[in-house]
Image (cartoon, rainbow, N blue to C red):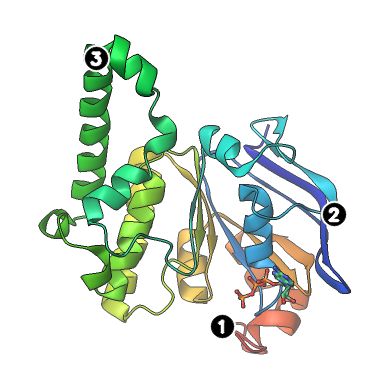
Amino acid sequence: MALLEVDRLSLQFGGVAALSEVSFHVEKGEIFALIGPNGAGKTSMLNCISGLYKPTSGTIRFQGEPILALPPYKRAEKGIARAFQNIELFKHMTVLDNIMLGRHVRMRAGLLSCGFYWGKAQQEEIEHRRAVEEIISFLEIESIRHKPVGTLSYGLQKRVEVGRALALSPEMLLLDEPMAGMNSEEKEDMARFILDIHEERGTTMILIEHDMGVVMELSQHIAVLDFGKCIAFGTPEQIQTDPQVIEAYLGQEGTKEGRSA
Ligand SMILES: Nc1ncnc2c1ncn2[C@@H]1O[C@H](COP(=O)(O)OP(=O)(O)OP(=O)(O)O)[C@@H](O)[C@H]1O
């Protein structure tokens, strides 16, 4: 059984079909890429998976269970975490506090239990701190842990955004253009972190990325969207040689993005 199964998913915005009958599946432990030209429906698909958008029809199953009726926080509890295309951090708060906030759905001790079982709540707090410190050291951001996020470079903010999503200890991580706007050094760092997360934590990932070199190198399977339709699904080798993909997206040379991207 695949970890995530998307079956004939459609999403309509008035007259615009953002997604039409899209089907694909993501295996546990793989890096899966969603590619396609601007406006193809990639972010809309992530929004349907995380619960921000409600599809018009179709189904999504996570670990065999239908999830479309669940609100976003329930999907987060089930292990689906999201890093956004436009950074969604609290800019005035520190790196540490932002990542700690990402951990909140894993925190069980509420106000009542804190009152009755102070020791238990304290123990939990220590464990969450340890998990967060582990992420900070994993992402090599120890030196900026007490800095307000708004004072950091764009590349570092993107890294913190990934850290916030990782704090959920997710089963599946949705990464929407994690390298957009980065210089080549920052991109290399992010690619290394994605591979490390995959190898060391075994986290399944769905990656939206426009850089074809990165996509072909990192992912095991790729789905190609074009005008809301899934026009191809396969390994990087299959996608690179698929005539429909070359026509719609990669351009005649099969290396760069064709249509506006
Ligand atoms: N909230 C919304 N309201 C109306 N239309 C929307 C909304 N979100 C997306 N769309 C439309 O759905 C289509 C798919 O958009 P989407 O952002 O999913 O594409 P994308 O492949 O992620 O593009 P990009 O690569 O530019 O981020 C577009 O025509 C877009 O205008």
Q: Quadrant of the C terminus?
A: bottom right
Name the amino acid, label 3.
Answer: Trp
Q: What is the C-alpha distance between the residues marked 3 and 2?
A: 46 Å
Horizontal relation, residue 123 to residue 34: left or right: left
Q: Which mark is residue 255?
A: 1
Rendering coords of residue 139 (x, y %):
24, 54
So how many labels did they put on this image?
3
Identify the residue shown where x is 14% and y is 55%: 146
Identify the residue shown where x is 64% and y is 89%: 260
Q: Badge 3: few (under 14), some or many (20 or more) residues near its Cα, within 10 Å?
A: some
Instruction: Tell me which label, 1 or 3, sits earlier in the chain.
Output: 3
**Height in image: 243 above or below 46?**
below
Name the amino acid, label 2.
Answer: Thr
Q: Which is closer to the viewer, label 3 or label 2?
A: 3
Asked if one can make out residue 71 in the rendered structure from this viewpoint, the answer is: yes
Q: Which is closer to the viewer, label 1 or label 3?
A: 3
Rendering coords of residue 66 (x, y %):
74, 34
Quadrant where ligand 1 appears: bottom right
SS of the residue under disc 3: helix
Q: Which mark is residue 18?
A: none
Rendering coords of residue 149 (x, y %):
26, 64
Q: What is the C-alpha distance between the residues marked 1 and 2?
A: 34 Å
Quarter of image, res 130: top left
Q: Which residue is mark 2?
A: 56
Name the amino acid, label 1.
Answer: Thr
SS of the residue under disc 2: loop
Q: Badge 1: few (under 14), some or many (20 or more) residues near its Cα, within 10 Å?
A: some
